[in-house]
Amino acid sequence: MIITCPYCKKKYNIDEKKIPAEAKGVKCKACGNRFPLKFDQDPAAQPEAIIEEAKSPSPDVKKVGTRKIAVSLSKGGVGKTTTAVNLAVGLAMVGKKVLLIDTDTQGQASYMLGAESQGGLTELVTNELGADEAIVEPRERLSLLSGGKSLAGLKRLISRKDFGGELTIKEALAPLESRFDYMIFDSSPGWDVLTVNVLFCANEILVPVSLEVMTLQGLTEFLKNISAIRKHREGLDIKYVLPTFFDKRVKKSFTILKKLEDLYGQNVCAPISNNVRVSEAPAYGKTIYEFAPGSPGAKGYRDLVRKVADDDSLFR
């Protein structure tokens, strides 16, 4: 018998004989939502009723809130955009509805996805475009708010505000939250008003850390800045530390990885290998899953998706 989650559309092949007679509901392992099942008789005798019940969840079942993840670190060259794009695409591939928000003036997220748009985040915030006009959909279940040079104007707009400038992006995105399971923010290098806005909007932080000594110094400075934000954003913390540019041939890669594991424990994700395919893919407007699905880079980002979604069954 096939049961489909009414929220994320994940399908489960269930043996009716193993369903307890007293069972009244199930929990989807993919999205965490519960939906009811009612059995008036032997469950094996009425699979159609079970499936119909799954399609029409009880109004008492509440949708899990949108997860907002900032991919951020003050230092450049650590793989922030690559990580944000491949995480967002990977989550969309496993059935999640994802909005990728590019807050970098370089606008590389659009380039990596081969996407073109008439506007993006700036135009949404300034009300020059409505959400449906500002958002493009470069992949199935994946939406994109582009960044680019226009963000320089958005920075000036935020800086001129006497009060509440740090909430500008959060307020603009609030009406969109109900549409998506995840919002993934690609942050720019450095520390500016856009980065502050992202951290006032996000509820989780994913930090890509290239396995280099200078990046550890950049991480230390970033943590100091996060501490300042946390005074005004209770609960904001670094949830994932992603080692990038891992090279098994270089001893320092193992040394720095061990140091990260000692400091952050279970928050450290499986490292992303230093793989040329990852850097080649954007030239073709493709993600690593499309360009080289069997490469070590693709495997690393599939591992990341499984960790973020907390579901080891994904991509199996």
Image: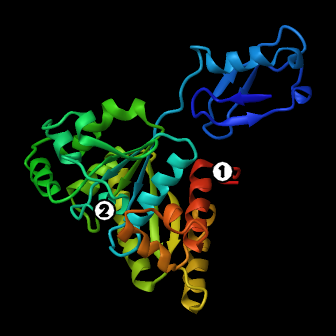
Q: Residues within 10 Å of mark 2 (few under 14, many from 20)?
A: some
Task: Kindly indicate the quadrant of the structure image that contains residue 219.
Answer: bottom left
Left or right of residue 84: residue 198: left
**Residue at image mark 2:** 111
Question: Is disc 2 placed on a helix, strand or loop?
Answer: helix
Disc on the earlier residue, 2 or 1:
2
Q: As shown in the figure, which amino acid type bears the numbered disc 1?
A: Leu
Residue shown at the point (75%, 18%) measured from the top left: 50
Q: Which corner quadrant holds the C terminus?
A: bottom right
Q: Residues within 10 Å of mark 1 (few under 14, many from 20)?
A: some
**241 or 33: which is nearer to us?**
33
Residue 111 in the image, given as x and y percentages of width and height: 30, 62
Question: Which color scheme did the rendering employ for the protein?
Answer: rainbow
Can I make out residue 238 in this image? no
Q: Nearer the viewer, mark 2 or mark 1?
A: 2
Q: How many labels sit on residues?
A: 2
Question: Is disc 1 placed on a helix, strand or loop?
Answer: loop
Residue shown at the point (38%, 61%) measured from the top left: 72
Work out whether 187 lies above or below 217: above
Residue 216 in the image, given as x and y percentages of width and height: 44, 78
Residue 60 in the image, given as x and y percentages of width and height: 59, 15
Can I make out residue 209 in this image? yes
Task: Give the number of the disc on residue 314.
Answer: 1
Work out whether 145 lies above or below 264: above
Q: As shown in the figure, which amino acid type bears the numbered disc 2?
A: Tyr
Task: Kindly indicate the quadrant of the structure image that contains residue 165.
Answer: top left
Work out whether 40 lies above or below 290: above
**304 or 236: which is nearer to us?**
304
